[in-house]
Structures are given as C-alpha cells and as structure tokens.
C-alpha cells in the first residue's frame, strides 16, 4: 500500500502545527512499514493507493484521483470555524445552504464544501471538528473519523515533574495566539511568563510589540526564541509552573499535547476543541477576556498550579500512525 501526502500550504511560508503534523505522521507511518511519498504534481508516473490531502481539496481533484483508482482522505483543520458561537455557526449554515440553492454549481464548487461528501474518509482532530464536518459540510457520518495529533516519545518518557517558577507558552508569535495580550497580563498579575517560539517575519509589528514588553519587564517576561532540542523542551515542560495558550481560535494544539504528556498543568482559551479533548482536567480563560480578565486567570492558575493533577496522556505519533494505517487499509480493502 502506497500513500501520497499532499498539502497546498508551503512549509517555508507558514511554519507551525500543520507542518509538524504532516512530517511526524509520515515518519510514524514509515516506521510501521507504510510507504509514503509527497505528491509530485509534475510526475505523471507516480502511483499510489491513497491520496491523503491536508487541507481542503477541490471537488475536481478528488474526482480525478478516484477515477485513477485512489482513495481520497481529507484532514481539514477547522480551528477558526470551531471558535464561532452557536448563533454564528447557525447563520453560516443557513447562508451556505442558501448559496447552494441559489448560485450556480460552478461558483459553489470553488468553496470546496462538497469535498467532505466526496472524500472516502475525513479525518478530524477532535470530536468537535468531526461534528462540524457532519453538520456544516454534510459529510457522511460513517466517513468521518476522529484521530488526534500525537507527541514524540521524548515527551512521554518517564521524567520527574517539578513545579517551577515560569508559566510557559510554546507557539508562533502571532496575534491569533494572543502572546502580547498574555505578556501584558502576566506583568499586571506578576506571574513569570516564558514565551518559546518565533514570528513568521522578523519585521512583524506584533512581534516587536512583544519584544518591547519583554525588554521593559525582563524579570517577568522571558524570551530567547525557539527551542529546537526536543529533550530540552520536554525538560522545560516538566519544570514549568504551567502551560498557557490563550488563542483567539485553535485546533488541537500539538504544544498543549506535549506539555500534557510531561504532566504540566494547562490553562487554555475556553473553546469547544479544548473541552472536547481535555474536559475538566485543565483550566480555562474566556476567549473574549481583556487584559484584566487574562491577568486574573493567570494569577488564579499560577497559585493553583502545584495542586492541579496532570492532564490525560496523549497518543504517541506511533499510535497515531497505527490508527491511520487501519483507516487506509479499510478503504483499500473495501475497493478490492
């Protein structure tokens, strides 16, 4: 069985969770004997049994792949849609149905809404995103599978948990992650805050706003860039006071899973994905909270962190690979 991986977002343009997801999934599958190649759009001799696209593939390409005898699997990240209110989601559902009725199919096909109904399998990272695929895009229920991201073995390895001084965020420094807002609130709450990550561009205004806060308050806000050494990062999680990620919207955060694997307490934005994955085992801050609200949440979390039990253990990437291989096999066998 050969699987072809495809993604329309170039890694060099947008480093982050999706790149990690794709690379780690490929390694995990190869480690258990699945042949995986990246789709070479220029190579008309390349063959495969399964086309796994990370993103939303057009209806035309799905049909073309299926005509070539390939099964098509979609993994779409629905973090933005998943953060919308029930009223906003209902309004969006109504508009989508009205457009499908009133507009030419040539126009609506460009939106890719029907892709979820045409694909042989749709992979959602959380139960909430699986619900959105079925509800918003009318994906057949039997074709929707929930398979979360995993973490590397270094984070699951036994290690001593020590509750230290710093609250830690591991993320790209972007407005959607609310790094600046969290840093400002940490200064107000006097909770030491360590940011690990990098911006998409060194001249980004939001990044420089964060650097100004850090330089003005070096005792409370720490920043030295990203940490490439995974063993060192696991040690940081195990020695952190807690992990904080207060994004405006988010899909299943790999960094949150890594911190959870190391037994680190979590403070997350109060969003459906987080409740679906972690339930009441982690702490939450309202997504709409301003600086004062974030500061209060940080203070409460900081004080309570030593008594907060460890979050549930996430899957390893090998476990993810084995579950994904079973999905691929079921599709290929059904076509035989």
Image: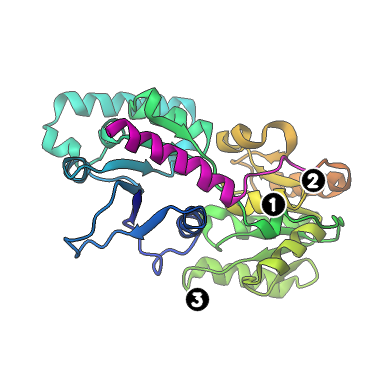
Tell us which disc is closer to us: 1 or 3.
1
Residue 188 can be seen in this image: yes
Tell me which segment is drawn in magenta.
310-336
| Secondary structure predominantly adopted by residues drawn in magenta | helix
Q: Earlier in the sequence, mark 1 or mark 3?
A: 3
Residue 191 can be seen in this image: no
- Residue name at image x 19 percent, y 36 percent: 108
State the colouring used for the structure image: rainbow
Expressed as whole percent of the image width and height from the top left, the position of residue 67 reads 16, 41
Q: Which of marks 1 and 2 is nearer the N terminus?
A: 1
Question: Is 116 left or right of 209, judged from the image as shown?
Answer: left
Q: Name the residue under label 2.
A: 301
Q: Check disc 2 and report its element: helix, strand or loop.
A: helix
Q: Mark 1 points at which residue?
A: 244
- Residue name at image x 47 percent, y 64 percent: 15
- What label does residue 132 carry, if any? none
Q: In which quarter of the image is residue 275?
A: top right
- Callout 2: 10 Å neighbours few (<14), some, many (20+)? many
- What label does residue 202 carry, if any? 3
Assess whether mark 3 and mark 2 are in contact (beta carbons under 8 angstroms).
no
Assess whether mark 3 and mark 1 are in contact (beta carbons under 8 angstroms).
no
* Mark pair 1, 3: CA separation: 23 Å
Assess whether mark 2 and mark 1 are in contact (beta carbons under 8 angstroms).
yes
């Amino acid at each position: 069985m050969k699987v072809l991986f495809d993604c329309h977002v170039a890694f060099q343009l947008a480093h982050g969770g999706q790149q990690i997801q794709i690379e780690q999934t490929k390694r995990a599958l190869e480690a258990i004997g699945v042949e995986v190649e990246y789709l070479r759009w220029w190579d008309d001799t390349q063959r495969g049994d399964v086309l796994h696209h990370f993103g939303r593939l057009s209806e035309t390409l799905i049909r073309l792949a299926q005509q070539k005898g390939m099964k098509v699997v979609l993994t779409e990240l629905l973090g933005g849609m998943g953060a919308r209110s029930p009223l906003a989601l209902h309004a969006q559902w109504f508009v989508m149905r009205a457009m499908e009725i009133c507009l030419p199919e040539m126009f609506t096909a460009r939106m890719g809404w029907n892709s979820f109904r045409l694909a042989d399998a749709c992979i959602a990272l959380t139960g909430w995103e699986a619900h959105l695929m079925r509800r918003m895009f009318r994906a057949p229920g039997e074709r929707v599978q929930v398979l979360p991201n995993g973490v590397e073995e270094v984070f699951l390895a036994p290690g001593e948990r020590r509750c230290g001084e710093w609250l830690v965020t591991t993320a790209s420094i972007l407005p959607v992650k609310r790094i600046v807002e969290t840093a400002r609130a940490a200064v107000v709450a006097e909770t030491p805050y360590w940011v690990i990550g990098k911006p998409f561009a060194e001249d980004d205004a939001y990044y420089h706003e964060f650097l100004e806060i850090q330089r003005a308050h070096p005792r409370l806000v720490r920043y030295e860039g990203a940490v490439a050494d995974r063993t060192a990062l696991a040690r940081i999680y195990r020695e952190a006071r807690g992990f904080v990620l207060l994004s405006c919207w988010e899909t299943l955060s790999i960094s949150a899973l890594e911190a959870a694997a190391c037994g680190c307490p979590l403070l997350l934005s109060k969003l459906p994905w987080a409740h679906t994955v972690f339930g009441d085992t982690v702490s939450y801050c309202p997504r709409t909270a301003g600086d004062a609200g974030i500061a209060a949440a940080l203070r409460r979390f900081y004080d309570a962190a030593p008594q907060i039990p460890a979050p549930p253990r996430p899957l390893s990437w090998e476990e993810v690979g084995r579950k994904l291989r079973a999905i691929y096999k079921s599709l290929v066998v059904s076509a035989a």
